[in-house]
Image (tube, rainbow, N blue to C red):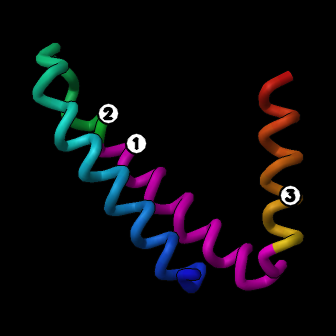
């Protein structure tokens, strides 16, 4: 099993790699500031998630994330 901070970094780089692979397939003209905002927001989300994970522990973090996903799905 991976340590949570290392797993979070792997997830971040995997998402960035996936976006790099799929970006050429979508050849629309996009304002350069728009993807930058999404990338910065994603990186901040990873950092906040790792910090919360360190404070709450794995079980509480999973429960909180599950509740947020259920609420978001409604």
Marks 3 and 1 in Cβ contact (< 8 Å)? no
Q: Quadrant of residue 18?
A: top left
Q: Earlier in the sequence, mark 3 or mark 1?
A: 1
Left or right position of 22 against 3 = left
Q: CA distance from mark 2 to mark 1?
A: 7 Å
Left or right position of 72 against 44 = right
Residue 64 location in percent, x, y?
Answer: 86, 57
User: Judging from the image, what secondary structure is the residue with disc 2 in?
Assistant: helix
Q: Residue lying furthest top in this view?
A: 28
Marks 2 and 1 in Cβ contact (< 8 Å)? yes
Q: Residue lying furthest front in this view?
A: 1
Range of magenta residues:
36-58
Left or right position of 29 against 46 = left
User: Judging from the image, what secondary structure is the residue with disc 3 in?
Assistant: helix
Going 54% across and 82% down the picture, which residue do you hit? 2
- The relative height of residue 42 versus residue 74 in the rendered view (above or below) is below
Residue 35 location in percent, x, y?
Answer: 30, 37
Crowding at dot 2, Cα within 10 Å, few <14 / some 14-19 / many 20+, comes out as few
Residue 68 location in percent, x, y?
Answer: 82, 44
Residue indicated by mark 3: 64
Q: Quadrant of residue 50?
A: bottom right
Numbered circle sitting on residue 34: 2
Q: Quadrant of the N terminus?
A: bottom right
Residue indicated by mark 1: 38
Residue 28 location in percent, x, y?
Answer: 16, 14
């Amino acid at each position: 099993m991976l340590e949570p901070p290392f797993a979070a970094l792997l997830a971040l780089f995997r998402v960035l790699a996936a976006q790099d692979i799929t970006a050429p397939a979508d050849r629309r003209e996009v304002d350069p500031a728009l993807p930058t905002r999404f990338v910065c927001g994603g990186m901040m989300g990873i950092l906040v998630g790792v910090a919360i994970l360190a404070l709450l522990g794995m079980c509480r973090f999973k429960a909180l994330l599950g509740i947020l996903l259920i609420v978001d799905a409604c």
